Amino acid sequence: MRKILSVLILAALITAASGCISSNPKTSVEKTVTIGHTKVYYSGDVSLSMAKNLALFLQNEFSFNNDTDIFLTKSGGDYTVKITSTYKSPDDIEPATRFYLHLLASRISQDVFSNSPVTLTIITQDSKDLFSTKSEYSYVASGEVRVYYKGTTKEEAQKVADYLVSLVGQNYEWDLILELEKDDIYRISALTGATTADQFTDNQKKAYQGLAKDLSDILGGKVELTVTDVAGNKLMTFEGG
């Protein structure tokens, strides 16, 4: 599902590089670096290595096969990444895409900018902002399972990721969000390709209930496991512990 989303988004993030300077976002960009078909325009207070790392990350993420323009600026310790797209209005960006980009902002923060805050913005070809999202989570991975986490520890998130990959295998793509809130309940959101709760069989529901219990044992506390669609909308919730 993760790869399907990235392919769908790719189609809207492709633009021609020619004429970009005249349509830059209203910010100071002084230098450029290109990796594959990803061209990053960056401000003077951003290092070349950071710009290169961003270009490489986005080229690997989307496998751009047409020239695509990225604008990178820095304010204090915060980074802003603007990606030029063929979207015409905010309504063109589907909820699933918005949710994907929200998680992507957190991965850019961790993998490119050493956990510095990141604002990821999608813009039109004439530089109008359409959608912005900020990094919120750290994340760990085990195989193709990614666990985004907040309010809990890296070690706990890794335990969850390792356990899940032991169930589904190294090549199964699965994104989850783990949060420990003030009421000491571990809230876990598990993304699925389903769109409604009635798509789940009784056996699948039993499996999720068992998973909630197992994760409660692993984390040593009460777990609330919510199954969501790819846009983050809740479908079902199971309690463990």
Image (cartoon, rainbow, N blue to C red):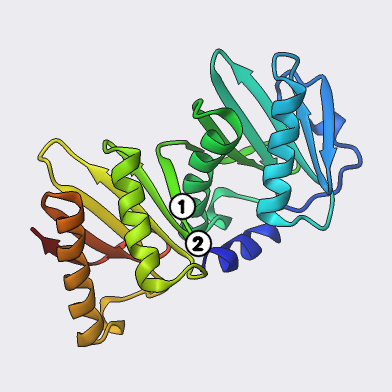
The residue under the point 74% across, 57% down is 63
Query: Between 223 and 128, which is closer to the camera in this rendering?
Result: 223
Query: Between 157 and 73, which is closer to the camera in this rendering?
Result: 157
Q: Is residue 125 left or right of residue 144?
A: right
Most extreme residue toward the right is 18
> Looking at the picture, which amino acid does disc 2 mark?
Glu
**Visible residue check, residue 140:** yes
Q: Is residue 94 left or right of residue 66?
A: left
Q: On the image, numbered disc 2 is attached to which residue?
A: 144
> Looking at the picture, which amino acid does disc 1 mark?
Ala
Q: On the image, numbered disc 1 is attached to which residue?
A: 141
Query: Between 241 and 131, which is closer to the camera in this rendering?
Result: 241
Q: Is 82 situated above or below 171?
A: above
Q: Secondary structure at mark 2?
A: loop
Q: Secondary structure at mark 1?
A: strand
Q: Quadrant of residue 229?
A: bottom left
The residue under the point 72% across, 32% down is 71
| Image x and y of residue 124, in percent | 69, 43
| Image x and y of residue 135, in percent | 46, 36
Q: Is 135 situated above or below 174?
A: above
